Amino acid sequence: MNESQEKEKAILVGLSCPVFKPGEAADEATLAELEALVETAGGEPVASVLQNRPAPDARTFIGEGKCEEIRALADAHEAALIIFDNELSPSQMHNLESLTGCTVLDRSALILDIFAQRARTGEGKLQVELAQYQYILPRLSGLGRAMSRLGGGIGTRGPGESKLESDRRHIRRRIDKLRGELERVRQVRAVQRRQRKKTELPLAAIVGYTNAGKSTLLNRLTGAGIEANDRLFDTLDPTTRKKRISDTQEVLLSDTVGFIRKLPHHLVSAFKATLEELQFADILLHVVDISDPEWEIQAETVDKVIGQLGAGHIPRVMVYNKADKCETLP
């Protein structure tokens, strides 16, 4: 985003219900993380609302009374964007937009937008585009305002409006094509793994929550020179470097995309070609931001995703980062 451009103002909304499955509800910590995500996407969070209900409202998720409250809040702050920490159905998104007069996104759409900004390599762009189409396809009839903003903005990056207006068959054909291209990427990676095995160099994969310091660690260990910034999802494309650890032994160190709570399953699926490398690592270096009050929950999130990827059996070393920011260590 150009610094001269005015940032999009956003109202953040989260819902907590006892009927939600573990990890689905919003709380102060997940709303704070959502705020950081909005800033990463180039927006400006101006207010947040955390609501408690016995169950989500089928039509509007939060109830029409709360919708009116949020509409007034958006008017007061001159915000045209409302972002939910929870996942919304297409009809709920459409109804919320009708009642508030604002563009409505959920957490998954926001994360996909950030990935669209960050993707640099051809492979990364393919993976992000596939994830976006998988998210969009069941929502074609309900996305409404978010897909029709001609001026662009948060939630509109990616495949583009002209493609989104195409029918479902066109999008399904595009998904099939992207899957085919990514399958070829997986085959290339398989060949590279076989070649690596011939050299008998062990592989250490660096994993962790987003912004835990994975790229900084790789830079320190290998002098890789990867751009490492204090922001979420700064690294999407994996980097592998050699590191000599003794007179007779070298190892390969590989950086990976960071994980986050409520990571859209479309992204995990689309990034399979990249993430499945974890299955073939000899050891995992799990980087933890020990200065974050939520570090234990973040570590559990990473462990869960590692298990989903079939890499839960691989030995790991915990790397506690940013200890200099802690007054007392846990």
Image (spheres, rainbow, N blue to C red):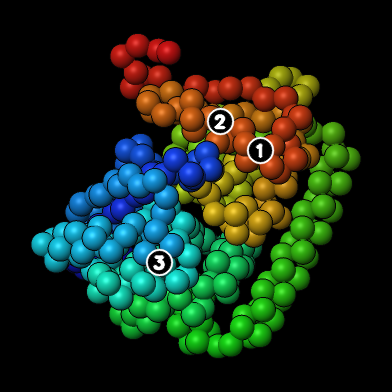
Q: Quadrant of residue 231?
A: top left
Which numbered disc covers residue 300?
2
Label located before the other in sequence (3 or 2): 3
Q: Which quadrant of the rendered structure holds the N terminus?
A: bottom left
Circles 3, 1 touching at the beta carbon (< 8 Å): no
Image position, residue 205 (x, y; %): 66, 36
- Whether residue 74 is visible here, answered yes or no, is no
- Alpha carbon separation for disc pair 3 and 2: 33 Å
Above or below residue 70? Residue 93 is below
SS for callout 2 = helix
Label located before the other in sequence (3 or 1): 3
Seen as rendered, the residue at the extreme front is 54
Residue at the spot 39% in from the left edge and 73% down from the top edge: 94
1 vs 2, front mark: 2
How dense is the environment of label 2, judged by Cα within 10 Å: few (below 14), some, or many (20 and up)? few
How dense is the environment of label 1, judged by Cα within 10 Å: few (below 14), some, or many (20 and up)? many
Above or below residue 121? Residue 197 is above
- Alpha carbon separation for disc pair 3 and 1: 35 Å
Question: Label 3 belongs to which residue?
Answer: 59
SS for callout 3 = loop
Nearer-the-camera pick, 65 or 74:
65
Nearer-the-camera pick, 214 or 17:
17
Question: Label 1 belongs to which residue?
Answer: 306
Give left or right: position of 190 versus 224. right
Q: Amino acid at mark 2?
A: Glu
- Alpha carbon separation for disc pair 1 and 2: 10 Å
Which numbered disc covers residue 143?
none
Give left or right: position of 214 versus 25. right
Q: Quadrant of residue 327?
A: top left
Circles 1, 2 touching at the beta carbon (< 8 Å): no
Image position, residue 2 (x, y; %): 26, 66
Image position, residue 61 (x, y; %): 39, 59
